[in-house]
Image (cartoon, grey):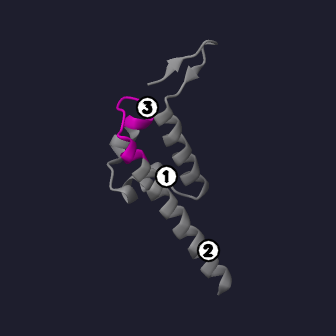
Amino acid sequence: MRHLGVDNTIMESTTQQAIRAIREKAERSGFTLSDVAYAAGIDKAQVSRWSTGKVVPLYSAVINLQEACDALVEARLLALQKERAA
């Protein structure tokens, strides 16, 4: 859940910050958060609820999301390396 800070700015929870970082990493590599959720076997609507703070996920679920993102990015990098080597 987002809260107002001392200077009335909106503060994100640690979970929201983690999911935002995962989204940004995925997008830099050409993926969406929905792609990452699919790769992790997590419903994209559930990930949306986590990112808005409506539901707080288990720590292990966020780790699964991060690992899925890392795997997608790594696969993309390997594909690019193979293209350049050919």
Quarter of the image where one finds residue 28: bottom right
Within 10 Å of the Cα at label 2, are there few (<14), some (14-19), or many (20+) other Cα atoms? Answer: few
Badge 1 amino acid: Thr
Residue that badge 2 annotates: 80
Percent x, y of residue 63: 43, 49
Element under label 2? helix
Residue at (36, 29) in percent of width and height: 54
Residue under numbered circle 3? 52
Q: Is residue 86 magenta?
A: no
Q: Do the residues labelled 3 and 1 touch (CB within 8 Å)?
A: no
Q: Which mark is residue 32?
A: 1
Say which quadrant the N terminus sits in. top left
Nearer to us: label 3 or label 1:
3
Give the residues drawn in magenta, as a range: 49-62
Q: What residue type is labelled 2?
A: Leu
Categorize mark 1 by other alpha carbons within 10 Å: few (<14), some (14-19), many (20+): some
Q: In x, y percent, where is residue 10?
A: 56, 21
**Along the line of sight, which residue is nearer the eye, 80 or 4?**
4
Label 3 environment density (alpha carbons within 10 Å; few <14, some 14–19, many ≥20): some
Examine the structure image and report whether residue 52 is included in the region drawn in magenta. yes
Chain-order first, disc 3 or disc 1: 1
Q: What residue type is labelled 3?
A: Thr
Identify which residue is drawn at 67% across, 80% down. 84
Whether label 1 touches label 2, CB < 8 Å: no
Above or below 50: residue 29 = below
Quarter occupied by the C terminus: bottom right
